[in-house]
Amino acid sequence: MAFQINNNINENLVLNNACKRGRMDEDEDDYGTNSITTTTTSMEEGIKRLQNEQQHQKMQNDLTAQDQPNLPSITYASADYRPPPRLDALWLQAPPSAVPATTNNTMDEDLTDEDDVQSILTPSTSLQHPSKSQHYINNNPFSGYGLSNTHSIVLEKQQQQSKGLFVGTMLLIYTLVLVSLLLLAEPPVPLQAKVEAAEKLIPFDDGNIKYFGRWKLTEHDMRSNWPGAYFKTNVNGNRIKLRLNQPTHIYVQLDQGPVRQLVAKYTGQWPIQIDVAPPDLSEGRHQLLVAAATNASICLESLVLDLAGDTTPPANVSPQLVEFIGHDLALGVGTTQSLFTGFPWIVSNMIGTEHVQIAYSHARLMNDTGVLGMESRYFDWSPYDFLNDDEWDFSSYEPAVIVILLGQNDYKENEYTDTLLTFLKRIRSHLRYTSILILSEPLGDLVRQSQDAVYQLNDQGDQDVFFVDTTGWVQYGSTAFVDSMHLNDVGQDRLARKLAPLLTARLSIPRQPLPGPSPNPSLPHDWQTMDVGEEDAIGLPGSVSFDSPHTFTLWGSGIDIGNSKDAFRFVYQGLSADGVIEATIVSHSAFASCAKAGIMMREHLALGSPHVMIGISPANGIFVHTRTTNLNETRLVKKLRASPPYRFRLVRKGSNFLAQASHDDGTEKGGGDNPDNKNGDQQQEPPSPPSSAEWQTVANMTDLFFARDIYIGLAVTSCDPTVVSVAKFADISLSGGVGNGFYSTIVQEQTQQHPRLIYQE
């Protein structure tokens, strides 16, 4: 028998449930009471809570379209399939006696559970849709079993709970089984690279394999991380393979032959096996060299040789090691064979020593925001940030010489000296007996700052740190440069050949002083000469002749001395600290009105060097101009109408430069040749200036901060690269710290006790 329940009872159930929830928030002890009335909590709050719950239900449309209540949100294989009912389900038991419906505000004890009541309160039973609630009860599938309406609702809820519990249980079982399988299953084992029956393995720790560079010994392999790290060994046989524990890019050389680039790729087997022997390799003993390419590393697990093969120590391994610290130039970037055509490899082969490269592309000295420089990276075993947990163990090897080439990628000029000084001191704390050579950048970046750091260390007592000016070693242009930051094969070879005698001196036992420039057989005393500037801007090559140690004739071409780059002929000596140069320009022949001839003090020998010059020009007469920083614009300080002969004087004292001129009567006076001084000793008495000379100050320049060691000499440019300009200089006089590079000064009390060496071409 089916019972009909009016809407008031339905509404009471709704409100009682909402109130029950509100009371439970306040006191959990009320949970499970047998009677819920509409006066125990706020009716408005209950309605509000109900409406919030209704927004999350999805059964409203289904109740109007189906006669049975919605099932949980489960997808079955068939639309007609439903899980079998539990055998103890209430609706399969004997029907209880009918319970008449009442209109009071109490319910059966079974309905006091919050979740049971909540199951009744579907959107269709809301106060807004009483008709849908009545439709649901009138069509209750349980009413045919003679149950009361209240019991039928309970039975419906139990059925839904049973179905939901079944699905949840199955999902839980599935999840547990899957997790168990994952935990119990062994990880997939990669395929192992096979070793043929006729082959044998030589492990990475074989004593006949010699490693050079920064390597780390692990349980499974020998690992490198800095570019250019390499190993050598002699192998017997014509079958040579490498077993590597990671993909990489390597260079391989056999018997000093051509260098081959090989790429080791992962093909599904570990370790990676790569054949490094060419097909036509003969039987017998071969020297093997394997090097890590730029931005690559090697994880050597073993060598694979013929069954009868073996290894022996490589021949002619020098016990002395040279370490190179730098950027692209130290890696041979831009050359045909990369590392192997970079100056570190070339010069090491020239002098017969092994080497280490601590370099990476675009390296700088100074740390910057988000970028570490060599001041930090050098002391790590790897240049890569994610592998920088370990500091390098300096007891692994001790280089006899360190060569540092940095600066072109740094831009904080005011901080560079202090950073370099700290960097050198930190290196010295690890390597007490290593000679350190600081090379200038080929185009003169940060020459003054680098010199200052070196000389501060010298003054503090470290005499085994040297500054080497390389700006005169490689002329800028397409012959030797790829671009302003990279040398080609020719440029790298020139750099290596200039560096070789300096390294040889410091590797000698006992160590020898660094040699100065070779004497120029065409010039007296310590004079040197070269064309300064880009080769295309110079045009015709210049030359020089001398009639006496104090009289020179210069032929010079070039676009100009001015703007940001110069092109001219230079005859010069080194000047350390303060000094003076005087010379008379007797004559000047020129095709272009902008041609120049004069005397100059110049920081370095590259095309954009800071300088001060006083001279004469058809266009400007007497002029003084200066460039204060590298590759900056030249500034005309002053000009006066005049024509040769004129005598000029340029004085340097600290950061002040004085430019003076005096009209000359054209009579050459002075010492001339000295028959008692056949070697042309620079200390001979300089010629006396003309008696009529009265110096006129043309310009007095202050706060020009040049490097301590600079160049001083005579300069001529034709202002047209297709022709030459000719100038004759007489009564040339030098004083101060000039000549072969030994430090001296016109102020006697400032004389130092150790030499300052200048290196020129």
Image: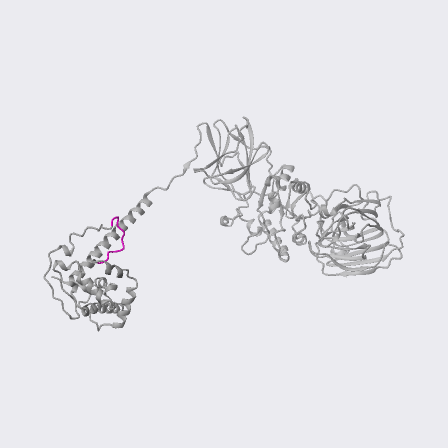
131, above or below 323, in the image:
below
- In the image, is 331 to the left or to the right of 193? right
Snapshot quadrant of residue 579 = bottom right
- Residue at 72 percent across and 55 percent down: it is 563
Camera-side residue: 122 or 552? 122
Camera-side residue: 649 or 191? 191
Query: Whole-percent x and y of residue 359?
Result: 58, 46
**Where is the C terminus found, in terms of image quarters?**
top right
**Where is the N terminus found, in terms of image quarters?**
bottom left
User: Going by the picture, which residue comes out furthest to the front?
Assistant: 65
Camera-side residue: 683 or 531? 531
Snapshot quadrant of residue 60 = bottom left
Q: Main secondary structure of the magenta part?
A: loop
Snapshot quadrant of residue 125 = bottom left
- In the image, is 391 to the left or to the right of 686? left
Q: Magenta stretch containing residue 71, yes or no?
A: yes
Whether residue 326 is visible to the viewer of this picture, yes or no, is no
Q: Magenta stretch containing residue 181, yes or no?
A: no
Query: Whole-percent x and y of residue 12?
Result: 20, 69
- In the image, is 150 to the left or to the right of 712? left
Query: Whole-percent x and y of residue 421?
Result: 62, 53
Query: Whole-percent x and y of residue 298?
Result: 51, 40
- In the image, is 516 to the left or to the right of 170? right
User: Going by the picture, which residue comes out furthest to the left?
Assistant: 97
Camera-side residue: 592 or 469? 592
Q: Which residues are magenta?
A: 69-78
Q: What colour-coding does the image apply?
A: one colour
